[in-house]
Image (tube, rainbow, N blue to C red):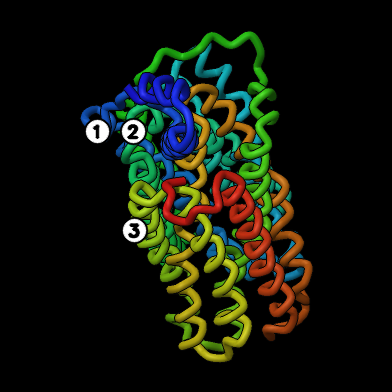
């Protein structure tokens, strides 16, 4: 009907030509809103997919985000090892997780979604069993840094590629709920890990975590089911042609840049709290407090994104992730300021990793979404691996003070101001109008 009206107006003259431009602009704006025009289930069996993906995030990033706890434990066990070397174990994890997004697609083509999830789950359980018998730093690199991350990468991308097939209008909320798995895990695992370590030691703590994984993965393997038939691949590589769209390349690069600044606060907030000399209870639980607040940032902003546009919500989210380290962490000299930072930065940062995938679905559609997700996460590898190592190199290893943390904090904050600028440019490349769903 819209197309017919436009044709009729084009045959007219005078003021009607203005109507043509306005109609085309409105139609384009709707395309920016949602590229896919088909109806999606928006629930039903899709909610079980969300449950399964939630548990995958709980078991993977829920524990990866808690590496700050391991950092403190390992610094105590290996006092002669530089903190920057220990932090590299944690830095390897998200980098390898993102790297293994590439072979997951062909695996799913060959053996299906459920068997691919099962392979990754077995690798993760075995990794934690082997971790329980490690006594040297190099062994931790092999088990926790590499083997565990390979399994996590397989289950992570397999699960994350499915929710977009079930949701369109509620896509951001769906991804927000799944990302809450990482938030809940980041709250639960520190208590589990620290409690087990205090009672039965690190070795048995790691074994028990491996046993806990088994029923959680069983539920996930049953729940995560794709809706659409997979496109037959002719290559193991993603479709590089998606990079020809400069807007996609820009948003993928902005996500990659964000990873340089995202992990340093997660890895070093506990170390900072201990060196600052705040109460032991606060120092031991500051990371848990921060991670618990990400629940808010993964639900409220992403629900608003479904209402006002995913790119529109990315802008303030990225801005505040950059602002709070500079405004609150940098001048923090007591536990009140540090707690304020943990609460507010945790709330803001919850949207960081959860907001980008649904933005891709909105702007570019479900077609070739798997390739776009793979390349999005591939862009995140350098920042995930190098970000925390760069930041940790700024901290003197032979000091028990907070000396050197100023540079780390500024590094993290400025990175996100750069990300904000990139997303702003993307937003206004579509239109300078403010009240538009983008």
Q: Is residue 373 above or below residue 293?
A: above
Most distant residue in the front direction: 14
- Lower position in the chain sequence, tag 3 or tag 1: 1
Task: Estimate the x, y position of residue 255 in percent, counting from the top left.
Answer: 61, 48
Task: Estimate the x, y position of residue 426 in percent, counting from the top left.
Answer: 61, 48
Q: Which residue is located at x 57 percent, y 40 percent?
A: 148
- Secondary element under disc 2, as helix, strand or loop, is loop
Badge 3 local density, few (<14 within 10 Å), some, or many (20+)?
some
Looking at the rendering, which quadrant does residue 416 occupy?
A: bottom right
- Lower position in the chain sequence, tag 2 or tag 3: 2
- Lower position in the chain sequence, tag 1 or tag 2: 1
Badge 2 is on which residue? 167
Task: Estimate the x, y position of residue 315 in percent, counting from the top left.
Answer: 53, 58
Badge 3 is on which residue? 300
Looking at the rendering, which quadrant does residue 390 occupy?
A: bottom right
Badge 2 local density, few (<14 within 10 Å), some, or many (20+)?
many
**Dot label at residue 112:** none
Q: Which residue is located at x 42 percent, y 26 percent?
A: 9
Q: Which residue is located at x 47 percent, y 29 percent?
A: 13
**Residue 287 seen in the current view:** yes
Question: Are the residues flagged by discs 1 and 2 in contact, CB closer than 8 Å?
Answer: yes
Looking at the rendering, which quadrant does residue 274 occupy?
A: bottom right
**Residue 93 seen in the current view:** no
Badge 1 is on which residue? 43
- Secondary element under disc 3, as helix, strand or loop, is helix
Towards the viewer: 125 or 149: 149
């Amino acid at each position: 009907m819209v197309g017919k009206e436009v044709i009729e107006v084009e045959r007219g003259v005078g003021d009607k030509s203005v109507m043509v431009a306005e109609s085309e602009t409105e139609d384009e704006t709707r395309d920016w809103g949602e590229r896919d025009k088909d109806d999606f289930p928006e629930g039903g069996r899709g909610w079980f997919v969300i449950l399964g993906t939630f548990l995958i995030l709980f078991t993977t990033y829920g524990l990866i985000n808690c590496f700050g706890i391991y950092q403190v434990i390992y610094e105590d066990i290996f006092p002669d090892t530089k903190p920057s070397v220990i932090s590299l174990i944690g830095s390897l994890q998200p980098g390898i997780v993102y790297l293994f997004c590439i072979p997951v697609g062909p695996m799913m083509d060959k053996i299906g979604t459920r068997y691919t999830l099962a392979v990754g789950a077995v690798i993760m359980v075995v990794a934690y069993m082997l971790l329980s018998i490690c006594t040297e730093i190099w062994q931790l690199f092999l088990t926790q840094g590499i083997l565990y991350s390979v399994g996590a990468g397989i289950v992570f991308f397999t699960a994350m590629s499915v929710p977009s097939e079930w949701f369109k209008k509620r896509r951001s909320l769906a991804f927000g709920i799944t990302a809450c798995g990482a938030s809940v895990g980041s709250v639960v695992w520190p208590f589990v890990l620290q409690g087990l370590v205090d009672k039965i030691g690190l070795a048995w703590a790691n074994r028990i975590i491996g046993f806990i994984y088994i029923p959680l993965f069983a539920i996930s393997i049953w729940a995560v089911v794709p809706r659409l038939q997979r496109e037959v691949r002719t290559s193991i590589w993603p479709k590089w042609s998606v990079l020809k769209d400069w807007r996609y390349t820009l948003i993928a690069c902005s996500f990659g840049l964000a990873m340089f600044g995202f992990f340093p606060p997660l890895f070093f907030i506990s170390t900072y709290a201990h060196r600052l000399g705040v109460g032991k209870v606060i120092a031991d639980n500051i990371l848990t407090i921060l991670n618990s607040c990400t629940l808010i940032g993964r639900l409220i902003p992403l629900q608003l994104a479904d209402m006002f546009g995913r790119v529109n919500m990315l802008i303030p989210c990225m801005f505040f992730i950059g602002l709070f380290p500079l405004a609150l962490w940098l001048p923090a000299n007591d536990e009140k300021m540090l707690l304020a930072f943990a609460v507010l930065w945790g709330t803001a940062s919850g949207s960081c990793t959860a907001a980008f995938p649904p933005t891709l679905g909105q702007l570019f559609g479900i077609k070739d979404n798997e390739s776009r997700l793979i390349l999005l996460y591939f862009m995140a590898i350098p920042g995930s691996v190098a970000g925390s190592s760069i930041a940790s190199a700024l901290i003197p290893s032979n000091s028990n003070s907070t000396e050197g943390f100023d540079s780390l904090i500024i590094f993290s904050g400025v990175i996100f101001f750069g990300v904000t600028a990139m997303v702003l440019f993307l937003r206004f490349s579509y239109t300078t109008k403010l009240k538009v769903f983008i």
